[in-house]
Amino acid sequence: MSANDPTTGPCPCGRTDRRDKPIGYALCCGRYLDDFGNTPAPDAESLMRSRYSAFVLERGEYLLSTWHASKRPASIEFEPGVKWLGLDIRSRSVLDADHAEIEFVARQRSAATGAATRLHERSRFVREGDRWYYLDGDLQVPLG
C-alpha cells in the first residue's frame, strides 16, 4: 500500500464508519469512480463525496458524466499540483425524492503559490431515473 496513492488507503472524501474509522477508497467512492458506467451513487451525498474524490484523483470524465447536462461545461481543467486537504460536509437537505442540497467546505493548497483556499458551497443535486447529478451550487462567502 503506497502512502502516495489515495486509491489504496482511506477514501479521499473522508467518510468514516459507525466507529469513526476511515472507510477505504474501494468500499467508498472507488466503487462509483472506477465503475461509474454501471454503479451510480445511491444518493446526493455519496455523489458529492465521489465528485470530491474525483477532483483529488483528477478524474475529469467522471466529473463531467455526473454533471447534469443542462449545466455541464464542455470540459474541465485541473490546476497542476493542487493538494486537496479535506472535505467537510456542513449540512444535507433532502428536498424531495429527486432533489437534494449539500453544503460543504473543500480545502486545497495551490502548488504554484502555496496558498491554502476553501471552497464553501451549497450544491444542488437532481435525480433522473436511478442516477443523481450535480446541478449547480452557490458559493458561500464569509461575512465580515
Image: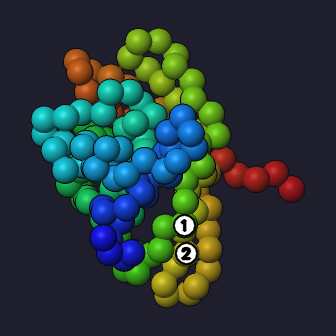
Q: Give the answer, above or below, for where 92 lies relative to 121.
A: above
Distance from the alpha carbon under mark 1 to that under mark 2: 7 Å
Labelled pair 1, 2 in contact (Cβ < 8 Å): yes
**In the picture shown, does residue 66 fall above or below 143?**
above
Which residue does the image show at 54% across and 66% down from the upper left?
85
Residue tagged 1: 85
Label whose residue precedes the other's in the sequence (1 or 2): 1
Q: Residue furthest right?
A: 144
Is any part of residue 126 visible from this angle? yes
Residue 144 relative to residue 116: left or right: right
Q: Residue at x 58, y 85 (%)?
A: 114
Which mark identifies residue 51? none
Callout 1 amino acid: Leu
Q: Nearer the viewer, residue 88 or 24?
A: 24
Q: In the visual, does 92 lie left or right of 131?
A: right
Quadrant position of the C terminus in the picture: bottom right
Of residues 113 and 45, the one drawn nearer to the viewer in this rendering: 45
Q: Nearer the viewer, residue 109 or 135?
A: 109
Residue nearest the viewer, comparing 50 with 115: 50
Mark 2 lies on residue: 109
